[in-house]
Image (cartoon, rainbow, N blue to C red):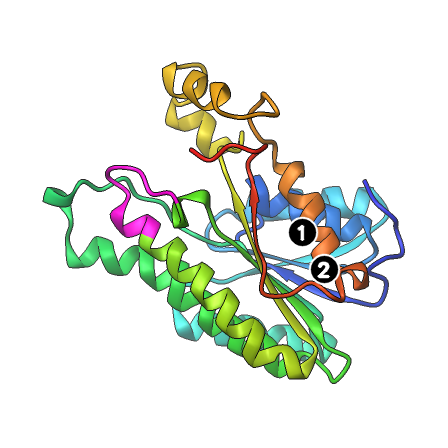
Amino acid sequence: MSDSTKLSNKIALVTGASKGIGASIAKHLGASGATVVVNYASSKAGADKTVAEIEAAGGTAWAVQGDFSEPEEITRVFSEIKQKHGKLDVLVNNAGVFGHVPLEHTTPEEFHRQFNLNVLGLLLATKEAVALIGPEGGSVINIGSLSGQMASPGLSIYSATKGALNSITVSLSKELGPRKIRVNALNPGMVATEGLHSSGVMGNKFEEAVLKITPLGRIGQPQDIAKVAAFLASDDAYWVTGQLLNLAGGGTY
């Protein structure tokens, strides 16, 4: 996957890493030498599978349950990391929820369901992570979406959360730069995850339309995102911060 020593001696937390993009990022960080904390909200089996695959490839990882839409659970997870490792070097804010909600079906409950995890959870996790990052600095990688810049109908809440993620990324990169903490966002387009397959989008006219406007001519794969995350986590990206990287094969849908 990657250089097995680039992230040696680094502790990395990946939220929402039981499947999809999060699991792929966790595996790539493990293959680069990091000790990976695999967070999950409900799928213990998925998280254990991610850990097992990291270990089978010669890496080190462990799983921790925690719903990052709940502030007290965020605090508990970071307390466990501090107790076990005493520090953190890399935070990947990947945990998120999606909802296609037309305006007439918009409710305060749905607004808070998405914002509590996608925005507040990300902020509180970053706050906890910064307290564990030492004077040598570290890397925060926020996983957003093209929807944060190019919203589609029915995604007003979701797109707002991802737009907020982009603003937070730039703001925190400036605030945390003096502490050598880099903050960047990866904004994927369509990625062939378990969630995408179960949504029924694959193989229909929407997928065809996306392919037509994607210069590189295919749907993204989890590893396409994970490889860039592994770069941003490493010291190779020491001069990269405050960046919003669109990972969509050139597509602008």
Q: Which residue is found at the position 67% from the left and 51% from the top? A: 229
**Helix, strand or loop under label 2:** helix
The secondary structure that dominates the magenta segment is: loop
**Residue kind at label 1, given as amino acid type:** Ala
Tell me the quadrant of the picture where the N terminus can be found. top right
Identify which residue, 38 or 12, lies in the foreground.
Answer: 12
Question: Does the image show residue 116?
Answer: yes
Question: Does the image show residue 76?
Answer: no
Where residue 17 appears, x then y in whole percent? 58, 50
Q: Is residue 238 above or below residue 105?
A: below
**Helix, strand or loop under label 1:** helix
Q: Is residue 249 left or right of residue 194?
A: right
Tell me the quadrant of the picture where the C terminus can be found. top left
Q: Which residue is found at the position 64% from the left and 78% from the top? A: 177
Q: Quadrant of residue 109?
A: bottom left
For residue 229, the mark is 1
Identify which residue, 63 or 20, lies in the foreground.
Answer: 20
Segment colored magenta: 150-159
Q: Quadrant of residue 53?
A: top right
Tell me if residue 152 is in the magenta stretch: yes
Where residue 78 appears, x then y in whole percent? 58, 74
Identify which residue, 16 or 94, lies in the foreground.
Answer: 94
Q: Which residue is denoted by mark 2 in the rendering?
A: 233
